[in-house]
Amino acid sequence: MLERTIVINGFSKAFAMTGWRLGYACGPKNIIEQMTKIHQFAIMCAPTTSQYAAIEALRHGDEDVAEMCEAYNQRRRYLMHMFKEMNIPVFEPFGAFYIFPCIKEFGMTSDEFALRFLEEEKVAVVPGTAFGDSGEGFLRISYAYSIESLKEALGRMAKFVERLRATE
């Protein structure tokens, strides 16, 4: 498979360099050469600061990555626990910073739920429909925030959900 394999990756997730616009491709020389021809006319180059940051991340970032992974894992576990406490079904994510709880029981669209939650509790969540029709009945919640912020937001959600269930 070596002659037919191309690896395309970036630094956004692994090194928390979202928005730095830096990535790489590895593969057979003839394919990479053709990709380079297309790329050089679409993009000038990766910013110099991003390139130096990526070099530093690759050389010395392993401990930071391990620390970030543990922090994200802690946040993910906290959200899973809180949604279980709220009795809201959610699939446990293992490769992203997002959780996708099911809010179908409340009889609202994802947009209605998100807007009402924002208005009443001042917490923003993304309606599942932002990711297509099959996202209806779900929310997308990022856990790339501090644990303190997540505790505040999920505490507000618990109150919100409690009020919704009380009016059913």
Image (cartoon, rainbow, N blue to C red):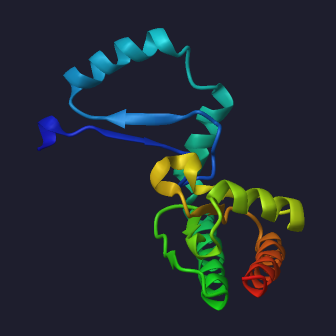
Residue 157 in percent (x, y) is at 77, 75
Q: Residue most toward the bottom?
A: 85
Q: For this rendering, which residue is in front, 58 or 21?
A: 21
Q: For this rendering, which residue is in front, 101 or 103?
A: 103
Q: Residue most toward the top?
A: 41
Q: Quadrant of the N terminus?
A: top left
Left or right: 86 as drawn, with respect to 115: left
Residue 152 in percent (x, y) is at 84, 75
Report the residue at 52% width, 61% height from top. 96
Q: How many marks?
A: 0
Q: Is residue 87 above or below residue 133?
A: below
Left or right: 118 as drawn, with respect to 28: right
Left or right: 126 as drawn, with respect to 104: right
Report the residue at 79% width, 78% height from top. 151
Report the residue at 80% width, 72% height from top. 153
Q: Is residue 96 above or below residue 56?
A: below
Q: For this rendering, which residue is in front, 105 or 114?
A: 105
Instruction: Indicate the quadrant where residue 167 lies.
Output: bottom right
Report the residue at 51% width, 56% height from top. 135
Instruction: Indicate the quadrant where residue 51 lies.
Output: top right
Q: Is residue 114 above or below residue 84?
A: above
Q: Is residue 40 above or below residue 24?
A: above
Q: Quadrant of the C terminus?
A: bottom right
Residue 116 in percent (x, y) is at 80, 61
Residue 31 in percent (x, y) is at 23, 23
Instruction: Indicate the quadrant where residue 28 lies.
Output: top left
